[in-house]
């Protein structure tokens, strides 16, 4: 038992001291024989009793049954549907922990991953990026289920560890005007002929529009279409999109109306998007994230920058307000075409004294990068890397291989075209998975000639165990 814990005088042998939280927001404790116990609902530094429901040779898993010494960071959950009880919503896992403590847990997860998986320690820790803890979720996939036994339609997230849909009447992590639609949506689906054929609604909020994408497994009747149009008329800003099959079939119910978009006011950038496009769930944090990433990249007016995994241009277009030249690279020709459209739109919107830099976009399979492809994309002073959960291993490995060739050309014949090629002086890496960030940091630091100058968390998803982060790598020498 650690020195800073003072258990109650009546401490019982079967009580457990919770030491930490894991990535599933379960408390982690050890029995006297060293066996690990994962405890749902328990927080660090609490003394608890546990109902064990799963046992293995080296670990057990259970649910807290009593708290004998409560954490000072335990708070009352802000949502009535949160909890460990049957039927509780599974969308959040940390509402019982103070939001500042949530951030501290995520920071520890990031540092532990960097060290234990990558043997990398940042020179300095960045201050966490934080924002509103409630009403932040501007994107969500909500399940729809007609429950005949209950005589009702449920619209919401799944129950914890279950395929059932939670009986939700509100959701405080959604914007209030979106949360207020949950019950009206239940009433809407109840009236539809396709009550059994609409399994989900995907929502995406822009700055002024709420896009609702209705997945329907059979053609909608004229009566159902009329119900959707009436719903949109009665709820300001709602825009219906229909999805009869795969994502490529998504289309507006009725053309016209305001576009779905968000702005990055600091850079004068306007970003139109479609509801099925990838955009950040939390627009408040995204604005701060873009601002800090560019500030850390410290782009100068004479520099060339590559934005790897550029998406719709979330970082590329702000970079174009600062650099001499920007190259945005993504894996899909269709997405690259959308990026070009967004660039042309913003180029037309830009004031004469703040025109955007020369910006190009290219499609590349970033999970099969080679030294030759890396060289072909040209020398860049700085890189911005924002990969999906899989990380950017192929990209950073190609960079590290070039470094090894240049350092030891006798044993590593220099690839044609590599003469005169220089690596970026600085890389800002935005990550949504601390384990793949740690793996890529290992390559950059131990093979690529970089040091990890800065690292810190981005609390993009308050009340969940999801860890977003940012790291800065500086070229040694």
Image (spheres, rainbow, N blue to C red):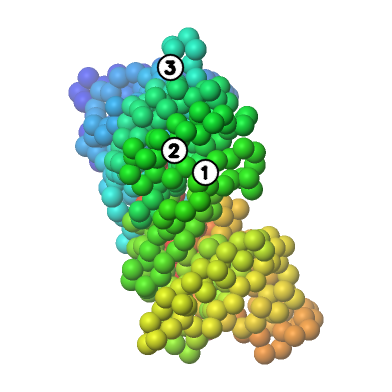
Kind of element beneath mark 2: helix
Quarter of the view holding residue 220: top right
Location of the N terminus by quadrant is: top left
Return the x and y of residue 368 as percentages of the image width and height.
72, 62
List the residue tagged with mark 2.
229
Q: In x, y percent, where is residue 357? A: 49, 83
The Cα–Cα distance between marks 2 and 3, rounded to whole angstroms, is 22 Å
Q: Is residue 60 left or right of residue 206?
A: right
Which residue is outermost to the top? 149
- The residue pinned by badge 1 equals 253
- Does label 2 or label 3 sit earlier along the sequence? 3
CA separation in Å, label 1 and label 2: 8 Å
Q: Residue at x 40, y 35 (%)?
A: 230
Give the labeled residue for mark 3.
152
Against 164, residue 130 (above or below) is below
Residue 301 in picture, x, y percent from top left: 44, 87
Position of 152 relative to 272 (above/below): above
> Is residue 218 placed above or below 350 in the rendered structure?
above
Name the one closer to the observer, 28 or 475: 475
Q: Nearer the viewer, residue 112 or 250?
A: 250
Residue at (50, 51) in percent of width and height:
255
Crowding near the residue tagged with mark 2, few <14, some 14–19, many ≥20 C-alpha atoms within 10 Å: some
Q: CA distance from mark 1 to mark 3?
A: 26 Å
Q: Residues within 10 Å of mark 1 (few under 14, many from 20)?
A: some
């Amino acid at each position: 038992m650690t020195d800073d814990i003072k258990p109650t005088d009546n401490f019982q042998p079967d009580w457990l001291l919770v030491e930490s939280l894991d990535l599933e927001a379960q408390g982690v404790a050890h029995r006297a024989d060293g066996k690990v116990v994962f405890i749902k609902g328990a927080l660090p530094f609490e003394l608890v009793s546990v109902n064990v429901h799963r046992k293995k040779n080296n670990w057990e898993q259970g649910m807290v049954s009593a708290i004998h010494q409560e954490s000072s960071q335990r708070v009352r959950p802000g949502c009535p549907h949160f909890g460990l009880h049957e039927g509780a919503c599974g969308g959040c896992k940390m509402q019982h922990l103070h939001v500042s403590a949530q951030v501290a847990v995520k920071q520890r997860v990031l540092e532990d991953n960097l060290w234990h998986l990558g043997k990398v320690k940042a020179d300095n820790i960045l201050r966490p990026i934080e924002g509103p803890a409630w009403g932040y979720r501007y994107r969500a996939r909500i399940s729809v289920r007609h429950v005949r036994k209950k005589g009702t339609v449920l619209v919401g997230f799944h129950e914890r560890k279950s395929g059932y849909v939670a009986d939700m009447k509100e959701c405080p992590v959604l914007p209030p005007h979106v949360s207020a639609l949950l019950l009206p949506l239940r009433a809407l689906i109840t009236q539809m002929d396709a009550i059994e054929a609409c399994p989900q609604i995907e929502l995406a909020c822009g700055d002024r529009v709420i896009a609702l994408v209705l997945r329907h497994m059979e053609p909608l009747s004229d009566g159902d279409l009329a119900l959707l149009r009436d719903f949109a008329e009665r709820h300001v800003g709602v825009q219906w999109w229909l999805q009869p099959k795969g994502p490529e079939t998504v289309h507006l119910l009725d053309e016209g109306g305001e576009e779905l978009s968000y702005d990055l006011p600091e850079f004068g950038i306007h970003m139109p998007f479609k509801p099925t496009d990838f955009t950040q769930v939390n627009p408040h944090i995204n604005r701060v994230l873009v601002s800090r990433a560019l500030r850390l990249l410290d782009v100068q007016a004479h520099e060339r920058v590559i934005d790897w995994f550029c998406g719709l241009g979330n970082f590329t277009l702000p970079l174009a307000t600062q650099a001499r030249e920007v190259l945005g690279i993504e894996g899909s020709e269709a997405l690259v075409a959308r990026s070009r459209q967004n660039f042309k739109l913003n180029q037309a919107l830009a004031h004469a004294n703040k025109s955007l830099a020369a910006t190009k976009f290219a499609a590349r399979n970033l999970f099969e990068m080679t030294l030759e492809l890396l060289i072909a994309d040209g020398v860049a002073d700085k890189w911005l890397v924002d990969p999906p959960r899989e990380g950017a291993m192929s990209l950073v490995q190609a960079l590290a291989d070039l470094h090894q060739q240049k350092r030891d050309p006798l044993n590593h014949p220099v690839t044609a075209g590599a003469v005169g090629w220089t690596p970026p002086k600085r890389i800002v890496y935005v990550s949504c998975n601390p384990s793949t960030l740690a793996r890529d940091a290992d390559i950059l630091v131990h093979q690529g000639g970089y040091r990890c100058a800065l690292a810190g968390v981005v609390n993009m998803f308050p009340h969940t165990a999801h860890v977003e982060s940012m790291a800065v790598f500086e070229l040694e020498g």
